[in-house]
Amino acid sequence: MRNATGGTRYAVAVLATLAVAFVALPQVYGNQSVLFTMMTYMALAQGLNLVYGFTGYLPFGYVGFFGTGAYACSILVTFTGLPVLLCVIGGGLAALLIGLILGPLLRLSGAYFSIANLAASQIIYYVVSNEALKPLTGGPYGIKIDQVFAPTASYAAMLVVLLLTTALAAYFRLSRFGLGLRAMHQNPISAAVAGVNIVRARLVVWLVSATVAGLIGGVYAWNLSVFYPDAVFTLEISVFAIVFALFGGVGTVIGPLLGAGLLYTFYAAIGVSTPQYFQLLYGSLIVFLVLFLPNGLVSLLVRRKLHVL
Amino acid sequence: MSSEPLLRLENIEKRFGGLIVLHEQSFSVSAGEILGLVGPNGSGKTTTINVISGVLRANSGRILFEGKEIRNQPIFRIARLGINRSFQVPKCFRAMSARENIEVAATFGAHAPVDVDAILDEIGLLRHAGEPAGSLTVNQQKMLDLGRALATNPRLLLIDEIGAGLNPSELGAIAALLKSLAARGIALIVVEHLLEFLNRITDRVIVLGAGRMLFEGSLAEASRHPDVVAAFIGG
Amino acid sequence: MALLEYALVGGILYGVFFSLVGIGLNLVFGVMRMINLAHGQFIMLGGFGAYLLSSHLGLNPVFGIPLAVAGGIVIGWPLYYAVVPRLQRSNDPEMLSFILFFGIAQVIEAVTLLVFGADQHSLPDSALGSGNIGVLGQDFPDSWWVAVAVSVLCIGGLYLYLSSTRLGFATRAIMADRDEARTTGIDVDRVAAIAFVIGLSLAGIAGVFVPYMVGSVSPSIGGGLTTTSFAIIIIGSLGNPLGTVVGGLVFGIGTMLMQTYYASWSNLVPYALLLVIVLIRPSGLLGKAVRSA
């Protein structure tokens, strides 16, 4: 493509900025757990953007992959004693498996897909948190892997996952594969007639996005090391990822990062103590965005003829 | 020209629920030939194109392209085999530039490298190459839709009502373009209401009525055939 | 045997009530081709309306019914005209409306939380009669029977509205084909706005009885009610409001059987039903839900 080298340079710059920022920030801002959670939401918003921004499928149950990753990682740590990084990768693979099982959902159109995906995530949650699975998952009493607790190492791991997810978004944006995705997003039948294997392209994006969420969940569990099922399956996680991505602008690389960065900062300032006010704010924000700014913050940059990756 | 036709339909039947929209369709087209498909609204013309291009699945029968059965192939594979089409209502990638529209098909649908500029020139959009498809006029979008089909290097091209809404000089240009494509060896199936336009590019037509083939032969004979007259007046 | 009979009779009662819970969502979908993701929050508002009436004014909660209708008009009419025509002109009405109603759901939930707090509220048991009525030797509280009677009246009323009034006829025309209806001279937006108001009112009325059927009302119950409603209308027939009754009964009986025999898994019922149906018979039961490519 024409802009391939310029685009690649832009992508490298975005990745470098992210890396430098999250390496440097703990030196100037003491609360590393806030920074960690911000990276988690940036990565989740970006991971959700992979599938929503590039195919138009909005995975309302995205949290299901995140929770699956968190639990798969924790279970592997508990029962196998494998190195924790391998357990994190196991979390990604478990989410990939769930993504494969849910693959047939991609036959559904927009809103039906979203709700069916939501139902799937609730099923996973109810199964994992069920009393009957207490020996494996701890059931409603949660799970504990504090033997591998390592805040700095898991912080670094989350940064790597964030960079990986962002690199994937850049790939979707700049590659030949991404050209097919854009065409498919705008008109699936025309894309197929133009020779794009739309069924496979959708499935690939879906599985990549699921795997990423599983990895994020795995690292999150490692960082938390003790948690209840609610903490990794609450619908709020899907909701935040959706709102953050929409606010920044989906289908771009920098949009979800900006959206998550800005809104999570705001959340950390007011939302933790008064979640209702934050909920009111983002609820109104969604209504406003849909009606007046459906392409998010970055569309303001595009209107000023700024190049947006 | 080889004796084996490029495309052959054998007893193709298509049903929507209990409604049979294509009855036992059998016909063939050879390389470099233009076949007109005419008939009243709802007679199955567009359905025929949809079935050949894979957008719809036929319920029974065979579709042979170069002797190979393609009836149950997915759309993209049929496109890569060398069958492409335009749409009655052009389906462009609206947020992409005209050039990118062509590039998608050249990238995914063609086996050999495609000269994107040459195609843009051929469809008269070279000057508009950088504009988003959604901002082009409907007629320009129709041409872009055709260009998208051409960019896959098709050997069989299915054209769905490209003439509607064009003025006489535009119709003349399209007729010349379609004839030049046939002269290159591309087979064309052209669905058209404008019989005068069709008459300029081919003499061989199939007349459909309520999903049945009523007539196959020259356009002049067709207009005198009693079944055809009845279908048009009755339908 | 008594357990099974209890589950079946209870399931039917529960299912009839949940038909009312889902029917507004289905009507709105049928007419507007939009999924009102705030449906459960409107039900929740109905529940809080009834709670306010009974706890602050000492009125019988059934007065929540006219309140729900008034609320449906006051909220639904302006909301329709403020957002729906604009969305329908956008490039992706299905997804954008879905997201917008989700935002509205969040606003409603947040406001309710700010006003009432996160606590669960229940309504006085005796307000709808303190006894039990038995069928086949199985006793169910009076409040259940009142809820079921109101559900039957509402669903029957909707049926009559659709089948034998001029507006209902126009509504059905819009459900069949919105553009075609417009060309025949129907004021599509007015008829659809009325359907939206009816949909919200029915949700509110269902909400009045939620504290009795589910146990309590709290700001957070909306999301679950929306998903349950969606499952019910998918099991029935999407876009056909009366098919909802079938979905309600399947859901009600399924839930009661699970609660009786595998209690800890019963909250899985609506989600599992939804998923199984979309995966096994996406075209049969859903019709338009499947992508063409």
Image: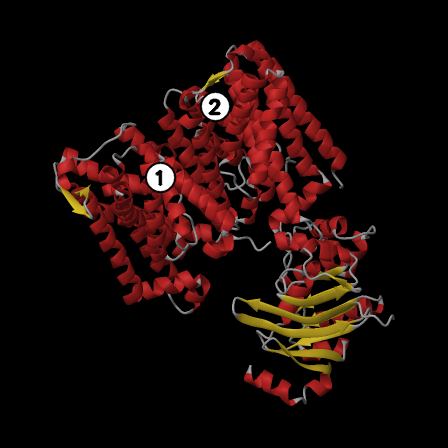
Image side of residue A203 versus residue C11, left or right:
right
Evaluate whether residue B96 shows in this view. no
Task: Name the foreground residue: A47 vs B117.
Answer: A47
Q: Quadrant of residue B187?
A: bottom right
Image side of residue C168 versus residue A5, left or right:
left
Q: Which quadrant of the rendered structure holds the N terminus of chain C?
A: top left
Q: Disc 1 marks which residue?
A: C258
Write down the chain letter for disc 2: A
Secondary element under disc 1, as helix, strand or loop, is helix
Q: Quadrant of residue A85?
A: top right
Q: Look at discs 1 and 2 and give the one toward the viewer.
A: 1
For badge 1, the amino acid type reads Met
Q: CA distance from mark 1 to mark 2?
A: 23 Å
Q: Residues within 10 Å of mark 1 (few under 14, many from 20)?
A: some
For badge 2, the amino acid type reads Thr
Q: Are marks 1 and 2 on the same chain?
A: no
Write down the chain letter for disc 1: C
